[in-house]
Amino acid sequence: MRRNLKKPAEIAGKIQKIVPDTSAIIHGRVSKLVADGELDGSEVIIPEVVMGELQAQAARGRETGFTGLEEIKKVRELSASHKVNLRFVGERPSYEDILLAKSGRIDALIQDIARKENAVLLTTDLPQALVAEAAGIAVKYYEAWEKAKKIKLEAFLTHDTMSLHLKEGTVPYAKRGKPGAVQFVKLSDEKLKAEDMDVIAKEILDAAKYEDNAFVEYGEHGASVIQLKNLRIAIARPPFSDGVEITVVHPVVKLTMDDYTLSDKLKERLKTAEGIMIAGPPGSGKSTFAASMAEFYLKQGNVVKTMECPRDLQVPDEVTQYAPLDGSFAKTADILLLVRPDYVIFDEIRKTKDFEVFADMRMAGIGLVGVVHATAAVDAIQRFIGRVDLGVIPHVVDTVIFIKYGKVEKVMNLAMTVRVPSGMSEADLARPLVEVRDFETGKMEYEIYTYGEQTVVIPVQAERKPAVQRLAAERVLQEIRKFDPNAKVEMLSEERVIVRVQNEIVPKLIGREGKTVKALEAKLGVGIEVEPFAATTGKTLQFELKETGGYMVLYFNKKLSGKTANVYIEDEYLFTATVGRKGDIKVSKDSDIGKALLRAVSSRRNVKVFT
């Protein structure tokens, strides 16, 4: 809608000179006037400060900068056919001018040029028009956006459109239907041109600035995210993408908790649960369920807020939607702690910092409902592992609700306990662990605990035992290969393992008086038997075996000091050790090996030693 604030003699008839400001160029008013023939034979004066401001915006990756520069290029192309004299005047803005642009410095410089050139100022900025009119400058003002205007994007949308996919050089597509019954539909046989995409993108950005309930959520070089009423729109441009692409996500249904098939037990749980994670694959209906929970808690008499980026949850007006403050959810959380909500819906938790903020707010006593992408219910829990201490997880997340095809498919609850993990029998293997149970049946499905240096999630089911043994073997092998890269491991049971290494590695692995292998047993939680790869490689060594005090001592020639000795009883391997500086090997009679040697001597069994 055109609006003339003033009709002086200079603009009552044909406009001879016109000076557009930045807003008029960005919104395409100049090229439209030229194309319509309203400026035929006239002069268009572009202030250099406008060029500088547009260049600065483009350098910062803002869409407005690129749009404005494209507009000037278009005016130049039209000027020849419409006999329009395009002229650039003034000086480029200084760094200080650009910094003070929001304070009106650039606008003032443009007004000075319009006054000096005795030209009409063209603008879509109302404050700029009012100031210029007050200063006696001829002004032609246009509304930046006609709110009743329909944008081209709306032609592709229907009531059942879940998402719209537009890209230059391709035909438009849409996903239509509802979660669980989605069709990928071709909307036209005609491919979209780059010019078409530019027009649609410009209309979206204009609407985001001037429509109610619309805003630019995110804007970087080549990428923008806009929330236009109930539409979440992502615009990608080169060099971020290989062509202009526009993706629109459109909510097709708004549900309440009564629309879901929930058991009475689960409904009661939701009233008391304070650490809920909603999980599911993309497009499964997670955010729709989260919005239903916001309304559910609101009706229960709670103060409810949301944390979103972008803010696209369809929630009642009483629920305030917060974005990342200065790009940080941590700062938003600081404000929310002062606001004191009963429940916060945290939509789309992705980064490690988001999980940390979720945990921090939960530990502060706020009821949290988080939304996370996952292919299975347990995956939502695993995404906290490594980001939050194991013992804290059940206090941060006590309930996981898995959504698929718009329905609640699985509900799990978490609890902390201390006991021996399933499949292990020795009492000294008891440890803190998290039990993950099916909410409806109470059946335990997973155990989460530390195993060595790793935190593991073990399914508790018929195939659990081989899984535990496989994990144990891999963990033991990882440690033993620090001594011998070619080591082999054989699981005798969940509590016992045989390790086979090169002969010369055996003493290093066992350590002095068995300290090294004992430390490994304590670390890994399994008993370890060490054996060499080969049984009788090398020659037979002469020795004398004597019982001396608390030791069984094997005496060798002192020349063999430092040699590796493999000790056998008959043909059964017993141990490997290094001959000491005095030509001996001492074994405590209280050890398993010492007792075996003592029994061999008592029963007159043959003890052999090989290199």
Image (cartoon, rainbow, N blue to C red):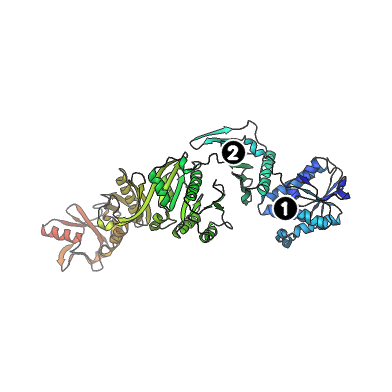
| Secondary structure state at the residue bearing disc 1 | helix
SS type, badge 2: strand
| Residue visible at 51% across and 49% down in the picture | 348
Per the rendering, the mark at residue 483 is none
> Which residue is disc 1 drawn over?
54
Q: Is residue 406 left or right of residue 522?
A: right
Residue 165 percent coordinates (x, y): 59, 39
**Which image quadrant for residue 99?**
bottom right
Q: Looking at the image, can residue 70 be seen?
A: yes
Q: Position of residue 10 (x, y in %)?
A: 88, 50
The mark nearer the N terminus, 1 or 2, is 1
| Crowd tier of the residue under label 1, counting other residues whose Cα lies within 10 Å: few below 14, some 14–19, many 20 or above | many
- Disc 2 crowd, CA 10 A, few/some/many (<14, 14-19, 20+): many
Residue 55 in the figure: left or right of residue 331: right
- Across and down, in percent, residue 415 comes to 36, 53
Q: Which residue is mark 2?
A: 164
Farthest residue to the top: give it.
189
Q: Quick one: 337 or 31, which is closer to the camera?
A: 337
- The Cα–Cα distance between marks 1 and 2, rounded to whole angstroms, is 30 Å
- Name the amino acid type tagged 1: Leu
Nearest the eye: 348 or 223 = 348
- Quick check: 436 left or right of 351? left
Q: Check the image and report above or below for 341 versus 227.
A: below
Residue 270 percent coordinates (x, y): 42, 49
| Drawn side of residue 363 relative to residue 233, left or right | left
Q: Quadrant of the C terminus?
A: bottom left
- Which amino acid does the dot numbered 2 rest on? Leu
* 173, above or below 325, in the image: above
One can see residue 381 in this view: no
Nearer mark to the viewer, of 1 and 2: 2
